[in-house]
Amino acid sequence: MKMSSATRAALLALTAVAGATLPSASRAESGTVSLTIYKAGWIIGGSGGSGTLNFRGRSYGLSAGGLDYGLVFGGSKTVLRGRVHNINQPSDIAGVYGAAGAGLAVGGGARAIVLTNQKGAVLELSGQQVGLMANVDLSGLAITLK
């Protein structure tokens, strides 16, 4: 079967575009993250905390803060550890992460979450939550480099 020159040109152009875009995605790296988040609220809640990004052998300080709206009652401390994927530089972790969630912590409990920001950074975190907290809410968490 013979290919027309137009089909060959289209395939060549598609291959060139794919070759130009794939390497940038394949260069994306990952790092480790630890965050300690304090959360409190009554209907409207707030959260804040700090942590560390370890990336390419260096440590970077992180600040985190956010708002929750829905059924929020109580207060808690959550210590999360995990990985961040799809970053090319430390500043890629900075941004706003949104989530809908539900949970109940009386004394202590496990917590796991996967979040994505507007730059495509993906946080996969798990850890322990301590306190008295009941929530069914929409929340946003902003992470910045210190």
Image (cartoon, grey):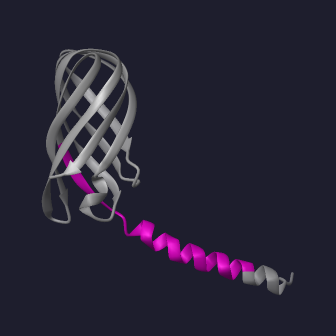
Q: Where is residue 62? Give x, y as percent.
A: 17, 48
Is 139 one of the magenta-colored residues? no
Q: Quadrant of the N terminus?
A: bottom right
Is 99 placed above or below 22 here? Answer: above
Give me the residue at 15% from left, 44% from top: 51
- Residue at the extreme right of the image, as rendered: 1
Q: Where is residue 114? Give x, y as percent.
A: 36, 39
Q: Nearer the viewer, residue 146 or 108?
A: 146
Magenta segment's dominant SS is: helix
Give me the residue at 14% from left, 41% from top: 50
Q: Where is residue 94? Give x, y as percent.
A: 28, 52
Give me the residue at 38% from left, 37% from top: 98
Q: How many marks?
A: 0
Left or right, 113 with reference to 39: right
Q: Where is residue 54? Give x, y as percent.
A: 17, 56
Q: Which residues are magenta?
A: 10-34
Q: Quadrant of residue 14?
A: bottom right
Give me the residue at 29% from left, 53% from top: 93
- Residue at the extreme bottom of the image, as rendered: 5
Q: Quadrant of residue 112?
A: top left
Is 54 placed above or below 99 here? Answer: below
Q: Quadrant of residue 68?
A: top left
Is 18 one of the magenta-colored residues? yes
